[in-house]
Image (tube, helix red, strand yellow):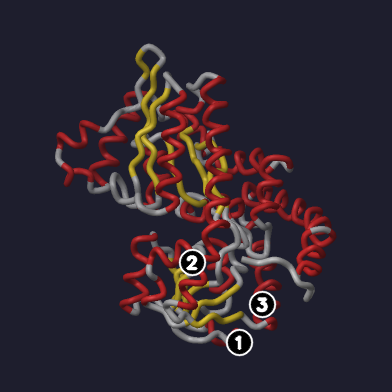
């Protein structure tokens, strides 16, 4: 049997219960007390009713924490068959172990980003964000009309979970730095929090990249444990207070032109659901996907203005020669990583094929419109 068959074969009700208890103990849940642990709802069916635990990689107060709460609310209010209880990052397990909790049987759903799960597989990183890849609008086109969900689902199925897109950050910023980046040599020895494939690209230029959960980013930057970090964009970055610990804010977010956030559901539990509940989850995840992207698009400019005008943040643009070299290297690094296993290769090939076709249309439509909209004609403004 292959890895997934072994994993699925072990997921009987009894073995899941044992693994669930062991996982909670190993993750530090014992500190919550035996009474607290016993209160966590096990996946159970009673008269057709099921209860799920969803583990999020994000904090409760963040925009993404609120997104998973909305998703659970949509399901809980609409379904008499399924109820979802959300545990935010650190409440049940450490943020970056959310998918581990699902694979262990301690939870039925994880919420995060594909590049958080590289300890399990590199493949989900490709669907999350491809350096110099798809914009948010292009990612949604790929997901819903380009076979993207099906392609990513095959990669997620290989590690025992069902994939659904459930949020998008839109184009991110290039990150916060405590020194200027004028050439590729400035990446040598740089300690930077940059997950996913973008981090792999910077590694090839001598950077020391690390993966940190959101709660650890500001303390690490403030203490000097890291020299730089990327996070999301102005709204999320302002809320996290990153301007307090770094001097320069760089643009653009070449490493994450847009980032798909993932809803990862235990296949064993997904297959128990009736078609109506599966459809409800699919529709709810699509709603949250659109809401998250719209939220960031709506609030990023006002936060950007605050960072510049109220906090005196120094904006910098990565020089074109640096960007060109990053773009060239991104293609080489991503191709090499994809070639390491057939699951990653299949997903990468699917994305780059779609990128080639959508790029032609984007250059014909969006790019040209953006150019003419910037011409010096007079137009009403606030």
Residue beneath disc 2: 303
**Secondary structure of residue under mark 1:** loop
Q: CA distance from mark 2 to mark 1?
A: 29 Å
Numbered marks: total:
3
The percent coordinates of residue 155 (x first, y second) are 59, 43
Residue beneath disc 1: 183
Residue beneath disc 3: 323
Q: Residue at x 43, y 19 (%)?
A: 81
Between disc 2 and disc 1, whose residue precedes? 1
Q: Nearer the viewer, mark 2 or mark 3?
A: 2
Residue 213 vertical position relative to residue 41 in the rendered view, above or below: below
**Secondary structure of residue under mark 2:** helix
The percent coordinates of residue 123 (x first, y second) are 58, 51
Q: Nearer the viewer, mark 2 or mark 1?
A: 2
Q: CA distance from mark 2 to mark 3?
A: 25 Å
Q: Is residue 11 visible?
A: yes
Q: Quadrant of the C terminus?
A: bottom right
């Amino acid at each position: 049997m292959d890895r997934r068959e072994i994993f699925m074969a072990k997921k009987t009700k009894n073995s899941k219960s044992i693994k669930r208890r062991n996982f909670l103990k190993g993750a530090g849940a014992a500190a919550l007390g035996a009474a607290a642990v016993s209160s966590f709802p096990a996946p159970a069916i009673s008269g057709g009713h099921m209860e799920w635990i969803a583990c999020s990689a994000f904090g409760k107060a963040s925009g993404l924490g609120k997104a998973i709460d909305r998703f659970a609310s949509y399901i809980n209010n609409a379904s008499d068959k399924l109820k979802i209880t959300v545990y935010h990052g650190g409440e049940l397990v450490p943020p970056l172990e959310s998918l581990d909790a699902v694979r262990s049987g301690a939870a039925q759903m994880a919420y995060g980003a594909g590049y958080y799960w590289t300890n399990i597989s590199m493949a989900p990183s490709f669907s999350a964000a491809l350096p110099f890849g798809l914009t948010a609008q292009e990612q949604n086109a790929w997901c819903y009309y380009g076979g993207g969900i099906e392609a990513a689902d095959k990669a997620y199925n290989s590690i025992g979970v069902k994939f659904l897109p459930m949020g998008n950050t839109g184009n991110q910023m290039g990150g916060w730095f405590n020194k200027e980046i004028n050439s590729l040599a400035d990446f040598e020895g740089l300690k930077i929090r940059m997950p996913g494939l973008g981090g792999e690209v910077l590694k090839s230029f001598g950077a020391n990249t690390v993966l940190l959960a959101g709660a650890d980013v500001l303390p690490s930057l403030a203490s000097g444990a890291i020299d730089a970090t990327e996070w999301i964009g102005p709204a999320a970055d302002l809320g996290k207070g990153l301007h307090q610990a770094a001097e320069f804010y760089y643009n653009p977010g070449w490493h994450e032109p847009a980032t798909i956030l993932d809803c990862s559901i235990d296949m064993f539990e997904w297959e128990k659901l009736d078609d109506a509940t599966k459809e409800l989850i699919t529709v709810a995840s699509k709603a949250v996907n659109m809401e998250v992207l719209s939220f960031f698009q709506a609030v990023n400019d006002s936060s950007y203005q605050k960072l510049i005008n109220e906090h005196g943040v120094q904006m910098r643009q990565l020089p074109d020669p640096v960007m060109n070299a990053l773009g060239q290297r991104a293609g080489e690094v991503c191709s090499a990583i994809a070639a390491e296993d057939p699951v990653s290769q299949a997903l990468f090939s699917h994305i780059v094929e779609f990128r080639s076709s959508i790029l032609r249309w984007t250059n014909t439509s969006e790019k040209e419109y953006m150019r003419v909209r910037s011409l010096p004609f007079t137009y009403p403004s606030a």
